């Protein structure tokens, strides 16, 4: 791949990540998750099935550390 093309792809990827981060910061995570869910529900059935495991995988780690943080406090009491 030519160096110039690789640089362009990298900068596009970085701009996309920056815009997603700005969207999350400006709208709040709940609104962003709602828009992502709406996009998945509007997609055809095969695309929904492919996207569903990704959502579960991203949501599960966010919940588990909170539960793990609460358990030691309960055990200490």
Image (cartoon, grey):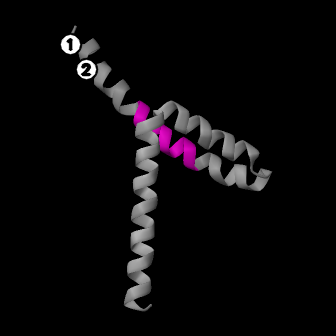
Q: Quadrant of residue 17?
A: bottom left
Q: Which residue is mark 2?
A: 72
Of 37 and 48, the residue lying toward us: 37
Give the image location of residue 32, x and y in percent.
53, 38
Residue at left offset 67%, top offset 54%: 50
Q: Which residue is mark 1?
A: 76
Residue at left offset 37%, top offset 25%: 67
Q: From the viewer's perspective, is residue 6 above or below residue 66?
A: below
- Asked whether the residues under the numbered discs 2 and 1 touch, taking CB atoms below 8 Å apart as contact, a structural biologist would say yes
Label 1: state its secondary structure.
helix
Region in magenta = 54-63
74 within the magenta span: no
Give the image location of residue 60, x and y in percent.
47, 37
Give the numbered dot on residue 42: none
Of 47 and 56, the residue lying toward us: 47
56 within the magenta span: yes
Distance from Cα at disc 2 to Cα at disc 1: 6 Å
Q: Is residue 27 left or right of residue 14?
A: right
Residue at left offset 64%, top offset 40%: 37
């Amino acid at each position: 791949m030519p160096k110039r093309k690789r640089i362009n792809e990298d900068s596009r990827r970085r701009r996309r990540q920056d815009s997603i981060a700005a969207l999350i910061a400006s709208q709040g995570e709940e609104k962003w998750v709602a828009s992502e869910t709406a996009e998945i529900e509007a997609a055809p059935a095969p695309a929904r099935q492919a996207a569903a495991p990704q959502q579960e995988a991203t949501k599960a780690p966010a919940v588990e550390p909170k539960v793990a943080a609460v358990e030691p406090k309960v055990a200490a009491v």
